[in-house]
Image: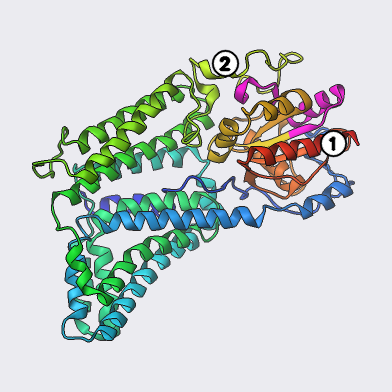
Amino acid sequence: MISFKKICAGLLFCCALSLSGYAKDSTSTDELVFTEIKPDAVVDSTIKKTDSIAQLTPATAAKADKITTPQKDAQKTLCGIFIAGFVGGLAALLMPCIFPMLPLTVSFFTKGSEKGKAFRRATLYGFFINLIYVVLGLFVTVIFGADALNSLSTNGIFNFFFFLLLVVFAASFLGAFEITLPSSLVNKMDSGSDKGGTAGLFFMAGTLALVSFSCTGPIIGTLLVQAATTGALLGPAIGMFGFSLALAIPFALFALFPSAMNKLPKSGGWLNSVKVVLGFLELAFALKFLSNVDLAYHWEWFDREIFLALWIVIFGMMGIYLLGKLKFAHDSALAFISVPRLFLATVVLAFTIYLIPGMWGAPLSSVSAFLPPQQTQDFDLYTTTLLAGKQSPTGDGPRKYADKFHPPLKLNAYFDYNEGLAAAKKQNKPVLLDFTGHACVNCRKMEANVWPDKEVYKLISNDYVLIQLYVDDKSELEKADVVITQEGKKLNTIAKKWSDLQARKFGSNSQPFYVLLDPKTEESLVSPQGADYDISKYKKFLESGLAAFHK
């Protein structure tokens, strides 16, 4: 068994960390200072006068103040985090550390008490469960700070740490060891539950949290990882609220309707099977963090095929396990396959088969947000077929940073702001400015599900000059490209340079962020927007920018 002391530091960071991934992506702003940039300000000699990062016209600066990340996106982020937390809580409820405690705890509330009093005590017990976990989520935000947590999502070292951490969690669920808290702490909390009254109920809730840590710890850690890295200030607290709510509701409901407990399944080996299945899911989820590191540092070895091959093996083994053909140390003998287990095995194996065509480039739109970009695919039959007869122009010679980035769907993209603007002026076309990132799951989803549409692709490739600016790339800039801001900040990486441009010029730090620009005035043709998976709406967005440009 691994003691809590040995993994204390890991769990503290993991409290910064989940099951969602559909939430809004953003990059850190801890390097930025938002102040007005005056036209006559003195800038460092390393900055060219034509560099749009260094100078903004008063009109553009005023316009930037009005452009903010939509509140609707923030609400979707928190909603996604809450749902992920609630699902995680339901999964934790079915763990062998919690499920057997459900009838024992409820019987304590109902024994010798009328229904109303039992319900009140169970509700208070559930409230204390909520309080303990929400305070944990707030503690994470207060200790690390929103910007520090947000920066972890694009930090290669921490992404690799998260990968290793989730592998440890997966190994724990698969039965290699148990992550436990010191018994002295558990005993001290349990002794407080004998006080009775409100204080006793609080200590009972605390005891549940500590005793069940070996089962809930990996789920909480995984949940907090993603909640923290979405950039939402209240993300960890909202995630913990959803998690604890799913845990607390059954205690109150069964205290109100104790006879319903007779319909619950009996404890048994199936509870360990829940842990094992979650272990497989933790292992699959860990690969996303490893992929982030590979992309940000241009290792170029963990490409889409390798990622998919590992997922196919992981989910294939999960399906085989559910059919009883694979056993782990703590599994009970399986006399027969239950119908729910058979149905779940069918779904898992069907998903495994669904992944297989991705080895040859199939877009796999339902999971595209989690996969490495399509352009990392070495053997890609899909893109070749998609672009048959409508290949983008080959371009006007070597592009800056073309050795580091590869545009999706073989589009004719630029990766430097000024170079792309110059090309747009020369071609007399508007600019589609795409602030994107390697770790941005919504960016991948847009590129896999929306951009391949025939009409959308035609607009991007023929009517716009595409400029993709990566705000999380750690590559060092050449000396001539380094920027010193008005506040003395040194922007010496691609990530810092383009995230600074996005924040200063457009008042946003979320990705993806699409801006349709007039290359001559460098002003927005229409209001910028983030991810929109409705193809017709995104097409209308592009057409409106085109109409404004030619007006």
| Image spot of residue 21 (x, y percent) | 48, 45
Amino acid type at image mark 1: Ala
Amino acid type at image mark 2: Thr
In the rendered image, the quadrant that contains the C terminus is top right
* Identity of the residue drawn at 26% across and 35% down: 318
* Identity of the residue drawn at 64% across and 37% down: 535
Q: Would residue 184 be visible to someone looking at this image? A: no
Which mark is on residue 407? none
Figure check: 159 above or below 140: above
| Count of numbered circles in the view | 2
Label 2, on which residue?
385
Q: Is residue 18 left or right of residue 177?
A: right
Which mark is on residue 547? 1
| Image spot of residue 499 (x, y percent) | 66, 42
Q: Which residues are magenta?
A: 405-432
Q: Would residue 423 be visible to someone looking at this image? A: yes
Image quadrant assignment for residue 305? top left
Q: Nearer the viewer, residue 70 or 229?
A: 70
| Image spot of residue 514 (x, y percent) | 70, 40
Q: Nearer the viewer, residue 291 or 130?
A: 130
| C-alpha distance separating marks 2 and 1 | 30 Å
Which secondary structure, mark 1?
helix
Which secondary structure, mark 2?
helix
Give the crowd class for mark 2: few <14, some 14-19, many >=20 residues within 10 Å.
few
